[in-house]
Amino acid sequence: MMTQDLPGQPDLAYRGHELFLEDVRLRDLAKQHGTPLFVYSKAAMLSALGAYQRGFAGRKVQICYAMKANPALGVIQVFAQAGCGFDIVSGGEMDRVLAAGGQAGKIIFSGVGKTRAEMKRALNLGIACFNVESEAELEVLSEVAVSMGLRAPVSIRVNPNVDPKTHPYISTGLKDSKFGVAHERVVPTYQRATGLPGIRVVGIDCHIGSQITQEGPYLDAVERMLDLVEAIEAAGIAIAHIDFGGGLGINYQGDTPPAAEQLWQKLLALLDARGFGQRQLMIEPGRSLVGNAGVCLTEVLYLKPGVQKNFCIVDAAMNDLPRPAMYQAYHQIVPLQANDQAESNWEVVGPICESGDWIGHDRTLAVQAGDLLAVLSAGAYCMSMASNYNSRGRAPEVLVHGDQSHLIRRRESIADQMQGESLL
Ligand SMILES: *Cc1c(COP(=O)(O)O)cnc(C)c1O
């Protein structure tokens, strides 16, 4: 029997020939809900969160789930019930937190392009903090807050100019990045902030990138941030909380990111050594809480052997799983039922009319039309980036826990898609 290593997904395993997530046989879910289908494990999410909680045990910390990784209400609800706050990047995400039972007082609002309307709503709700990304934004936020008779709690996102050694599209802390305030402008920006009538400085934050697999860039960024905290406080401005952002990578294909628990212990040792160990801390993990908690199930529609390449055409596509097309990302692909038939090499592709619509290059699989496959590590930045390209409805999502499964989003119908459109 051919079964493969399933990197990083501890709650995913073959039992006999059948692939299970927790105690649910994935083939049963595919039959019940159709494919493509996303399935997430609650135990895997809580165990990923547990590594953060253990790493920060005994400290003042607020873990804010960066919900753009996976904004399903059912997923947000799991993290809200586990005590998480939320890192949001739009007004829409704010509404999702509230709809899922999260608390406004635990929301931090990141992003380079917040609108006045989003600021107003966030101020009305009383969110914990605006992570401000530019001096221009600071001015506008102050204006909006003053017009409401309020002061906005603010942290400045600093750009530490550290290379996270990840894909360029998910590097955010380099000098030429659109994110954050440049290192040399940080102290003047804080000084300007304290002079604004609608601003109350509460913290500092940084976020250097995503899918980071080395500890060096993190710890460098932290050192640089602490240098800045010292400089800001020397200028007479108190920094109540320090926010280290997110970005910890996951294992997609033999990647070896540092374990959250160990990384945060190192970070805390560094803070202790410099006298910051008792500060209020924040952290904004996204991918590392959900990425390896999910899979996408898909059915093989057609095999199309060729002269140069063999194509395995599946019913999931780049609109469901955008990461390969967008970042040349790798997702492992395994059968839902292991078999011992002859293997060949396949280009696993979707039905969309784009040559960029591929899920996996040159994969060794024993497949036939009608077989079911699982695309692994699909819990983060898949459904959240899904689109309706080619007028494809977005896939349903199921959350499993033990032997229970809950449909947390039904399949999008064509009526859903056309709703809101009108003929001339
Ligand atoms: C996307 C993002 C995160 C989360 O990044 P991950 O790599 O998913 O952990 C955290 N903070 C900010 C500001 C972000 O934009």
Image (cartoon, rainbow, N blue to C red):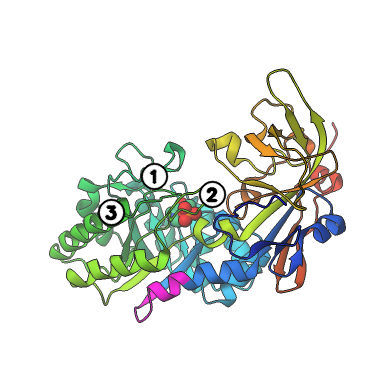
Q: Position of residue 82 (x, y in %)?
A: 55, 76
Q: Is residue 378 above or below residue 390?
A: below
Left or right of 397, for residue 125: left
Q: Quadrant of residue 364?
A: top right
Q: Earlier in the sequence, mark 1 or mark 2?
A: 1
Left or right of 199, for residue 24: right
Question: Can residue 294 be seen by looking at this rendering?
Answer: yes
Distance between mark 3 and mark 2 Cα atoms: 24 Å
Amino acid at the residue labelled 2: Tyr
Bounds of the magenta segment:
51-61
Q: Residue at x 29, y 66 (%)?
A: 266
Pick the quarter of the image with the C terminus. Answer: top right
Q: Position of residue 292 (x, y in %)?
A: 57, 58
Q: Residue at x 25, y 70 (%)?
A: 269
Residue 56 belongs to the span the image colors magenta: yes
Residue sitting farthest toward the top: 307
Residue 113 belongs to the span the image colors magenta: no
Q: Quadrant of residue 224?
A: bottom left
Amino acid at the residue labelled 3: Ala
Q: Residue at x 83, y 60 (%)?
A: 28
Residue 90 or residue 269, whichever sits in front: 269
